[in-house]
Amino acid sequence: MLFEPTAGSGKNSADLLAARRAADPQLAARLDQIAEHGYCVIEGAFTPEQVQRAKTELSPWLQGELMGRNNFEGEHSERVYALLAKAPAIAEMIEHAEVLAIVDALLTPNYLLSAALAINVHPGETPQPFHIDDNAGGTSSPKPREPLGVSAIWALDEFTRTNGATEIVPGSHLWADDRQPKSHEIEQVLMPAGSALVFAGNLIHRGGANRSDGLRLAITPQYCMPWLRQIENMVLAVPPETAAQYSERVQGLLGYSIVEPGFMGYVDGRHPRALIPAVP
């Protein structure tokens, strides 16, 4: 095991994590899975009603008209960005208690939402290039290292062997940068709709090929260390007037927050939440 989740830094944070693990054996088991394999799956995280609500809110932006611009986005895939400005139901995924309990353990306090997008994989899509999520800005910290982020992939359709299920390389979060996966090391993540795959940001993975005649829709929130620049500029994607409809937890994840103790993230000397209008 290369790293042990720390829930922040210092003795107090380590003690807090130990207490959480003792109080929640399921969380402890998930953290152990991530430490060893790089990922875990939470089945039944969303009810069928929640899945349908998210699909309904996303449907105006999923009309089969705007496909990806390259083989990474997917030339036969639709991507929807700035999700919280378009589909409020997605906030239930972003602040889902069981997912955030894992993120709390793996990242330091005041972490941020780095990205949140929908990916609708159409028939004929090819495999995405293998990659990791926590080096989008070209981090100068080589692997092996602790993860700088945590990602989740929420299945709004069942992930099957033929419809583009995410492919992962278990244990690759422990590898050096120069090690490439071999075919026998690749696994598909098969899971029912309403499930969430949660994994270390330095785990090698990719979107799979869709050889079926149906769609495969997923939402992927990605969280990052508080000192790391977000992949999507969230406070522009979700401006104060829009952020007002969400909880303080979601607002803080977007970037309407400061790093405490301290004041990193202030605006004109004030807490950025002061920009958010009061909800009548």
Image (tube, grey):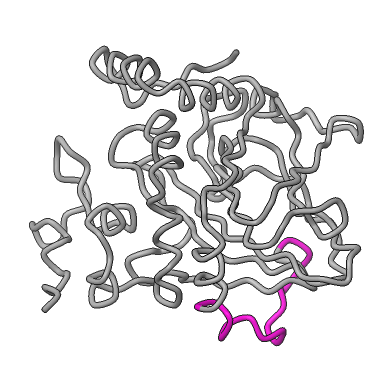
Left or right of 71, for residue 6: left
Question: Residue drawn at (70%, 45%), measured in percent from left and top?
Answer: 131
Magenta span dominant secondary structure: loop
Q: How many marks?
A: 0
- Asked whether residue 70 is drawn in magenta, I would say yes
Instruction: Pinpoint residue 16: horizontal percent, then vertical percent.
Output: 28, 19
Magenta-colored span: 57-72
Instruction: Pinpoint residue 184: horizontal percent, then vertical percent.
Output: 91, 31
Left or right of 241, for residue 90: right
Q: Is residue 64 above or below residue 2?
A: below
Question: Residue drawn at (31%, 21%), measured in percent from left and top?
Answer: 9
Question: Residue drawn at (85%, 30%), measured in percent from left and top?
Answer: 185
Between 203 and 214, which is closer to the camera in this rendering?
Answer: 214
Left or right of 21, for residue 19: left
Between 121 and 203, which is closer to the camera in this rendering?
Answer: 121
Where's the N terminus, which quadrant?
top right
Instruction: Pinpoint residue 188: horizontal percent, then vertical percent.
Output: 80, 43
Instruction: Pinpoint residue 262: horizontal percent, then vertical percent.
Output: 14, 39
Left or right of 259, for residue 177: right
- Asked whether residue 204 is drawn in magenta, I would say no
Q: Is residue 62 above or below residue 147?
A: below
Question: Residue drawn at (53%, 22%), measured in percent from left and top?
Answer: 29
Where's the C terminus, which quadrant?
bottom left
Q: Is residue 105 above or below residue 131?
A: above
